[in-house]
Amino acid sequence: MGLSADRGLLGRTSTVERLADILRARITEGFFTPGERLAEDSIGSALKVSRNTVREAFRLLTHERLLVHELNRGVFVRQATVEDLVDLYRVRKLLECGAVRYLVDPPDVSDLASAIHQAEAAVLAEDWRGLGTANMVFHQAITALAGSPRMNELMRGVLAELRLHFHSMPDRRRLHEPFLERNREILSVIETGDGPGAERLLHKYLDDSEHQLIEAYQAADTR
């Protein structure tokens, strides 16, 4: 399953929270897709953790709306709805726009710049899933500008759930590539310390991204 490479992240104290972090990250990266069944045995074997630990991690991620338990069938990656999407973007706007609104001095933008470089490398490799992951890293870094661990935690959950919606787009390149230049523009404004200017760009960016995904849902419903 490719999970064995994550075994080192658990360390000697294999906790439910750390396992949940790994699975959440894998969902964010698009490694697990909506409707995919997650097998306790395979995950436990790959990461060398007990089935009870896997079950508890599943419960945490079910509470976060990333997984769903179906009686007598097992645990599956959740298939999200357009209503979920609208609510997620409502939260994104609160978190990301709020993180830059009160910037008055140029912040440390090294994480933002690193995410841009990661995205550019993904474009060169025509790795569109990787481009989507780099985009998420960029927006997580925007939220981190607020210096709030609680906002960071909320954003991690939002981005993991958002990845479920990306699978509604038949063309991942069209979904992600046009926003790379807009990320560069947002970065250039943030690094000057212009919080209100960055907020305006971000709000329009998030509106456009939301509408693009809603249109994808609507198109799928008509097929």
Image (spheres, grey):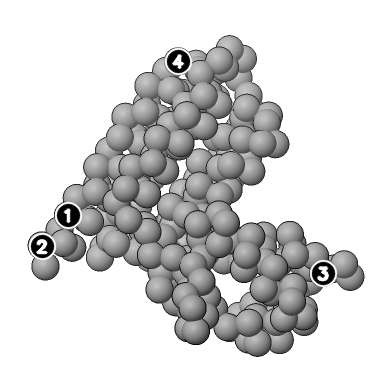
Image location of residue 170, percent across then percent down: 25, 65
Q: Residue at x 47, y 75 (%)?
A: 70
In space, the residues marked 1 and 4 are separated at their CA atoms by 33 Å
Q: Quadrant of residue 6?
A: bottom right
Residue situated in front as seen by the camera: 136 or 37? 37
| Amino acid on which disc 3 is placed | Ser
Q: Is residue 28 above or below residue 38?
A: above
Q: Which mark is residue 218?
A: 1
Q: Which residue is mark 3?
A: 14
**Can you see residue 32?**
no
Q: CA distance from mark 1 to mark 2?
A: 7 Å
**Amino acid identity at mark 4:** Pro
Mark 1 vs mark 4: which is more N-terminal? 4
- N-terminal of the pair, mark 3 or mark 4, is 3
Marks 1 and 3: CB-CB under 8 Å?
Answer: no
Q: Is residue 125 left or right of residue 41?
A: left
In the rendered image, which residue does mark 2 sit on?
A: 222
Mark 1 surroundings: few (<14), some (14-19) or many (≥20) residues within 10 A: few
Q: Is residue 187 above or below residue 7?
A: above
* Residue position marked by numbered label 4 in the rendering: 196
Label drawn at residue 51: none
Residue 39's x, y, as percent? 58, 83
Measure the alpha-carbon separation of dots 3 and 4.
43 Å
Residue 170's place in the image compared with 105, above or below, is below
Q: How many marks?
A: 4
Task: Tell whether 8 sits left or right of 81.
Answer: right
User: Label 1 is placed on what type of residue?
Assistant: Gln
Rounded to the nearest whole Å, what is the CA distance between mark 2 and mark 3?
46 Å
Q: Nearer the viewer, residue 107 or 1?
A: 1
Quadrant position of residue 114:
top right
- Are dots 3 and 4 in contact, CB under 8 Å? no
User: Considering the image in quadrants, where does the N terminus appear?
Assistant: bottom right
